[in-house]
Amino acid sequence: MIILAIDTSCDETSAAVTKGQMVIANVVYSQVLVHQKWGGVVPSLAKRGHEERIDWVIDSTLKKAKITKKDLDYVAVTYGPGLAIALEVGINKAKEIASEFDKKLIAVNHMEGHLYSSFVQNSRGNPKRDWQFPYLGLLVSGGHTELVLFSSHVEYQILGETRDDAAGEALDKAARMLGFGYPGGPVIEKLAKEAQNVDQYHFPRPMVKINNLEFSFSGLKTSFLYYLQKLSDQEKIKNLRFLASSYQEAVFDTLVYKTNQAIKKTGVKRMLMGGGVAVNARLRQKVRALVRTSGGSIYFPPFSYLNFDNAAMIGVAAYYRAKIGLIVQSADEFDRVPRLSLLQSTKN
Ligand code: KG4
Ligand code: ZN
C-alpha cells in the first residue's frame, strides 16, 4: 500500500511516501528560522510558509521515492490537532491531489502519528520491532503532553494531559526568560548537560501530590520567573547552567513521576515515547531508569527526525487506518479539527 502523507500542523511542511511501516521518502521543510525572531510560531507566517513550500516538498518526496502521483493508493493528511490555518494548507493540497488522481483520503490525528513514530521503518524495513499491545505512550512536544494507553491499532485512551503549558512549551518559555530564542528545549538541554544535570535550586514538581495523571507546568514557570527576578544580571549569567539544569530536572521529574503513576495504575509496562522533547538525552535517561526499575521496556523513535514533526509517521498511522477501512467518506465534508483529541480518532 503506497501512501503519500502530508503534515502541515505547525511549523514544518512535510511530505512522505510510505509503504506499510516503511518510509520510502520523507522531506521536511522547517520554518524554524522564520519563527525564531518572534520567539514562537506565528500562525499567519506558518500558513504562508506552507503555501510557498508545499508543492516543492511533495514533488521532491515523490521524486526521491521514484514514483508519480498515479502510483499512489491513498493520500493521507494530518487534520488536527494543530494550527487551523496551517492544517488547511495540507488538507487542501491532499484534496486537490486526491480529486485529480482519483485517490481516497485518509485523515490522521497528528498525535497518533507521534504514537506510531516508534514503529516507522526505513526503506530497508529496519528496525524490525514486533507489536505487543498494549503500550503506554508518553507524548511530549511543544503543544502537547499526554499519557496515552495505546491498546491496539487505532485504539487510544487518554490517561492524562496537561492543563496548561506542554512540557516543550515550558522549556521554550524558560529558555526565553534566560535570554534564548525559540526553540528553547535544545538550549536548555545543552546548558543542563554542562552543569551535569545538577538540581541546585529545587524548583517545585507540579501536581505530584495530586492523585491523578494530569500535568501543569504554569506554576513551575512562574516560580522560575520569580526566582530569576531576584537575581542580578551578573548572578543570572554566572548561574545560567545551574538554573537551566534545575528547571529541566523539575520538568522531567514531573513527567517521570506521572509516568510511574500511570504504569502502576494500568499495569502496562511497555512504553513508547514521541514528540520533540523525547529526543532529550536526559529525559530518555530518566525514563529508561524508571522502566528498568519497573521491569518494563521502552521504544523511542528509531531515527532522530521521527521525534519531530514529520509526515512519515502520518503515513504509517494512515496505513493502519486504511487496513481497517478508516478512510474519508466524503472529501467535501472533510475539514481540519484544530483541537482534535486522540479520543476522537480511536476506532471504538
Ligand atoms: O514535536 P515538535 O517538533 O513540535 C510540536 O508538535 O510541538 O516539538 C517541538 C518541541 C519544542 O518545544 C522544542 O523546544 C522541543 O520540542 N525540543 C526539545 C529538544 N529539541 C526540541 N526539548 C528538549 N530537549 C531537546 N533537545
Ligand atoms: Zn508534533
Image (cartoon, rainbow, N blue to C red):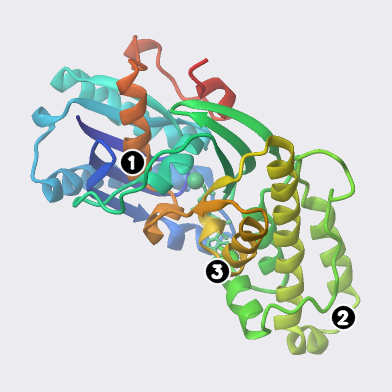
Where's residue 181, x and y in %?
A: 59, 68
State which quadrant residue 227 falls in: bottom right
Q: Which residue is identified by label 3?
A: 281
Relative height, residue 169 to residue 7 (above, below): below
Q: Which residue is identified by label 1?
A: 51
Mark 2: few/some/many CA within 10 Å (<14, 14-19, 20+):
few
For this view, does 335 lie left or right of residue 192?
A: left
Mark 3: few/some/many CA within 10 Å (<14, 14-19, 20+):
few
Q: Which residue is identified by label 2?
A: 231
- Mark in front: 1 vs 3: 3
Q: Is mark 3 within 8 Å of ligand 1?
A: yes
- Earlier residue among tags 2 and 3: 2
**Please, what secondary structure does the residue beneath circle 3 have?**
helix
Between the C-alphas of marks 2 and 3, the distance is 29 Å
Q: Nearer the viewer, residue 172 or 38?
A: 172
**Residue type, label 3:** Ala
Relative height, residue 102 to residue 215 (above, below): above
**Residue type, label 2:** Leu
- Mark in front: 1 vs 2: 2
For this view, does 44 lie left or right of residue 175?
A: left
**Residue type, label 1:** Glu
Between the C-alphas of marks 1 and 2, the distance is 44 Å
Mark 1: few/some/many CA within 10 Å (<14, 14-19, 20+):
some
Q: Nearer the viewer, residue 47 or 293?
A: 293
Q: Are marks 2 and 3 in contact (CB under 8 Å)?
A: no
Where's residue 282, x and y in %?
A: 61, 69
Where's residue 124, x and y in %?
A: 19, 52
Relative height, residue 107 to residue 275 (above, below): above
- View extreme (front): residue: 295
- Earlier residue among tags 1 and 3: 1
Q: Nearer the viewer, residue 49 or 202?
A: 202
Q: Is residue 49 visible?
A: no
